[in-house]
Amino acid sequence: MGISPVLWQFLVKWLNASALFPSEASTIAPYMDALYFFLLAITFVGVLLVAILLVVFSVRYRKAVHPVATQIEGSTLLEATWTIIPLGLFLICFVWGALLYFRIYNPPVNSMNIYIVGKQWMWKAEHPGGQHEINALHVPTGQPIQLTMISQDVFHSFSIPAFRIKREVIPGRYSTVWFQATTPGEYHLFCTQYCGTNHSAMIGTITVLTPEDYKKWTEQSTSGMSLAQNGERLFASMGCNACHSGNAAARGPSLAGVYGSKLLLTNGSQVLVNDAYLRDAILNPSQHVTSGYTPIMPTYQGQISEDGLIDLVEYLKNLSSNDRVQQTLTTSQSDQAAPSASGVVKP
Ligand code: HEC
Ligand SMILES: [Cu+2]
């Protein structure tokens, strides 16, 4: 870095205190800032160098001293120097940036997943346990958190400056971002993509709690049903289990353990079943038909909200055996007055 750690820490402290700079509250933040200050430092040195040379040369070679200009045909050494040094600096920026990029884009395997739905003009957060929040997000320290995000309408962008994270939230497609919070406290959440009249009001509060406090919070704010349980209800009430019961005679494939597996499609390609694929399989089934099956699955486009899709996806992610499908099949058949599931779009 070239800056001693003491001086470095002093600089960051001073910037925080001066409110010019958000505090560093995630594990990635110091790494992002180190690269940022490195870029700032070389830019500053470059500007200084050019400015000094400009002044020195205009004084030294002024007309009174040098009335006639000397023609210089070139200097290989000089040209090599001002090519190789910037090249080296840019390569350092590139490698450093790329390493950071991989770090930012690869969530640790033990991350906890939270879903975010953006819409004009608010943020909804859905915890796997069924806790729902609006314009707020509670997370524990010391645990990598992955956010799976989608927009219900236009482009938004999810940004927590104190965590140094920002990611586009797009209609029709899941995008993800991860972080690990380090310091309990409250931090700003912003939408950083202009999204209409009340864009500036699309803000919220991130509350970072200690693991114990987070546990208390999840117990206090539970809605009684986890996302997967909600999804199980939907699976029954929308008739999915008519074809996906897991029986040998069923018209659709068993969905137990499908998450994370590789499917062979009729067009010969192989796909990894992740959240995005599950969502798409429900909305556009005819686009990627699983090998060995006929494309009889109807599209559910327009019949289910993003929240409902999240419930279904979370249910399928956790579906390790067909017992639960069988169970919902029998309960939904015996119990005709099935509870109205919350994710269904009412016509
Ligand atoms: C009419 C029968 C039928 C219904 C109803 C149905 N599916 Fe399907 N589904 C299929 C068939 C057949 C396939 C395999 C062919 C394909 O990929 O389209 C399939 C494929 C899938 C896949 C892709 C994974 C795989 O192993 O192929 C998912 C996920 C899925 N269905 C979920 C659902 C959900 C959720 C519902 C309810 C909202 C539902 N299905 C309703 C018949 C059905
Ligand atoms: Cu927005």
Image: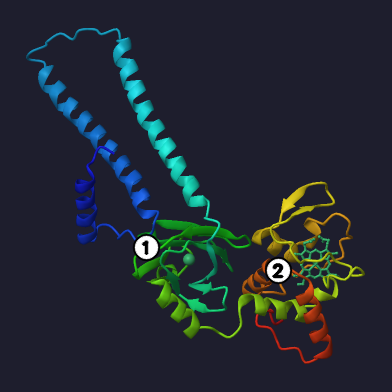
Q: Is residue 66 above or below residue 221?
A: above
Q: Does residue 116 appear to the left or right of 186 in the view shown?
A: right
Residue that extends furthest to the left in the rendered view of this protein = 64
- Asked if the residue at tag 1 contacts the one at tag 2, i.e. Cβ–Cβ closer than 8 Å, the answer is no
Give percent across and percent down for residue 226: 61, 79
Query: Which residue is disc 1 drawn over?
Result: 182
Residue occupying image coordinates x 20% and y 61% = 17
Toward which corner of the image does residue 275 lie, by quadrant?
bottom right
User: Dividing the image into four equal quarters, which quarter contains ligand 1?
Assistant: bottom right
Q: Quick one: 143 or 84, which is closer to the camera?
A: 143
Q: Does residue 55 appear to the left or right of 333 in the view shown?
A: left
Query: Which residue is disc 2 drawn over?
Result: 316
Q: Is residue 256 above or below residue 325?
A: above
**Disc 2 or 1, which lies upstream in sequence?**
1
Tell me the quadrant of the picture where the C terminus can be found: bottom right
Give percent across and percent down for residue 173: 62, 60
Q: Which mark is residue 225?
A: none
Q: CA distance from mark 2 to mark 1?
A: 32 Å
Q: Does residue 336 appear to the left or right of 184 in the view shown?
A: right
Mark 2 nearby-residue class (10 Å; few <14, some 14–19, many ≥20): many
- Disc 2 CB within 8 Å of nearest ligand 1 atom: yes
Residue occupying image coordinates x 88% and y 59% = 293
